[in-house]
Image (cartoon, coloured by chain):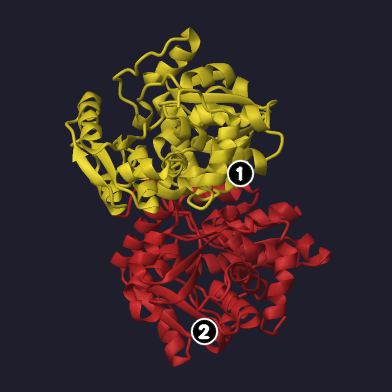
Chain colours: A red, B yellow
Amino acid sequence: MNSLPAFTNVLEAAERIRPHVHRTPVFTSQTLNKLTGAEVFLKAENLQKVGAFKARGACNAVFALSEAEAARGVATHSSGNHAQAVAYAAGLRGIPATVIMPEDAPPVKVAAVRGYGARIVWAGTQALDREQRLEAVLMETGAIFIHPSNNFHVIAGQGTAALELLEDIAALDIVLTPVGGGGLLAGTALAVAGSSPQTQVFAAEPQTVDDAARSFRDGIIYPPTNAPTVADGLRTFLGDMNFPIIRQHVNAIVTVSEEAIIAAMRLVWERLKLIIEPSAAVPVAALFEHPGVFQGRRVGIILSGGNASLDVLLW
Amino acid sequence: MNSLPAFTNVLEAAERIRPHVHRTPVFTSQTLNKLTGAEVFLKAENLQKVGAFKARGACNAVFALSEAEAARGVATHSSGNHAQAVAYAAGLRGIPATVIMPEDAPPVKVAAVRGYGARIVWAGTQALDREQRLEAVLMETGAIFIHPSNNFHVIAGQGTAALELLEDIAALDIVLTPVGGGGLLAGTALAVAGSSPQTQVFAAEPQTVDDAARSFRDGIIYPPTNAPTVADGLRTFLGDMNFPIIRQHVNAIVTVSEEAIIAAMRLVWERLKLIIEPSAAVPVAALFEHPGVFQGRRVGIILSGGNASLDVLLW
């Protein structure tokens, strides 16, 4: 499949994954509106299966496989939510899944992947280690690789969150997501362009890892920096399948400080009573750091996930 | 009003407060079901206005006042969620509210009460200090006292959470709440008896402060102990208005350990992605500590509130 996904693929994904994912609620907060000057609608993908929107793309990719493909099983490399999502989806379809994980992956995530019945293959601590190990696994098993963000059906599946948001909330001026690998952003852009073309699409990423903003500006895919960020799930490349979609349909990518991410995360915990992970706080932080863009607008945000560590508080 | 509230008053309350409170969602968790052996439905009153079911009773009491009564304003003593709830409800109706608070009340709660426009009167650190100060305020201002739990309209209002739960989820075997002052439990008992009489009503409280369980057993209202509990919102008396209702309609009150409360709270944060306060974790803990009662049953739980401290983690 060499073509790019389109709006119709998001609609197909919505049908395909409906039995397997939650239609998540949309929350509002008078406090958040008062503090930001925007009218904010939070799509709670932290309450999604596996605790993140990643369940959508993984289910779409796994259930789009033909019987013959499915019989070969699936594989991916991820230390985060996509690993759990692929394990979850493969478990539902009853096919083998192999997840290549770094040796320093958090035990709770390892346990979750195992709990869904996937096989774990360990591979050092670097992305390159995982990619090499993945190649070997694909050769050995013939499994189908499901990339976390640069995959036709993953992009289409991630777009279903925005599709639901636009169905539930009329006349949004802006839809705003975090951006890491670009799968959620590209899927969201397709959903918005197809179902509410007058709505703008913005993305936010940490200042310390601003590769997506620079890539968007220059039209070249830059690698992420190695700088630390509390939103470490966003330290990933854009890809050749999602980048053209992002360039075509996204209005702007803004960056936010680490302090603003942490403050936004605490605000959502405290006032919305929702556990969100740092990556999900990134677009909320953008409301505070870019008031000129968002004040007076109706802004829908994809709260991307809730798999935060509960062992330490970031504030 | 000397009579006890009845089911019809819960129905009236539901109509009266509908414009002012959220119809909160009900969540399920396969993990929680697997771990407890019960089929659990969590009514998320942590997502309610002011972060707790208390908004229901306070709105019902404030909006049930005649114009003449309302003009006198309202008053209450509380260091917790009821204070915010009365301030919120009075603000909506545009009438004065006075809240007697202890001098050691958490600054975040003080700010919330002020934010809703209520006047705060400080009164030592003991319950007796607050009651004496309240008497003086009522004499001075002529305000109507809204008791946190032993008040006709508060009890009826709190019952609306269970009413909604029973509308949304069919054929519950048990509805389970925390019990402190008894307002939520009595209101829940009325709602269940009136709309789903085959459903049983259970309550849970901390072992260290088991006055409700002993009172229920002996038919006498005992004062709470001074023993510490993480669920300190539950360290309050049953009252002469809610106790007869509880005795008539409640099947049993069980107790839970501090360790189980903390573990249940963490489980809900981690798996449901919902911030709940320790009092709300008490009924969840009961599922684990009393498996003989709950296993194999469809159990609806009122997750009473989400106003947990985010400065320290209890685990």
The residue that disc 1 covers is: B28
- The residue carrying pointer 1 sits among few (fewer than 14), some (14 to 19) or many (20 or more) residues within 10 Å by Cα, namely some
Is the Cβ of the residue at disc 1 closer than 8 Å to that at disc 2? no
Does residue A179 appear in the picture of this structure? Answer: no
**Quick one: A285 or B51, which is closer to the camera?**
B51
Compared with A7, B94 (above or below) is above
Q: CA distance from mark 1 to mark 2?
A: 36 Å
At 47% from the left and 49% from the top, the residue drawn is B47
Q: Quadrant of residue B39?
A: top right
| Label 2 secondary element | loop
Residue type, label 1: Thr
Compared with B181, A148 (above or below) is below
Residue type, label 2: Val
- Quadrant of the drawing holding the N terminus of chain B: top left
Residue B24: x and y, percent?
A: 54, 48
Q: Does residue A48 appear to the left or right of A235 in the view shown?
A: right
Q: Quadrant of residue B260?
A: top left
| Label 1 secondary element | loop
At 16% from the left and 31% from the top, the residue drawn is B124
Does residue B305 appear in the picture of this structure? Answer: yes
The residue that disc 2 covers is: A250
Residue B298: x and y, percent?
A: 67, 32
Residue extending farthest right: A67
- Quadrant of the drawing holding the C terminus of chain B: top left
Residue A289: x and y, percent?
A: 32, 74
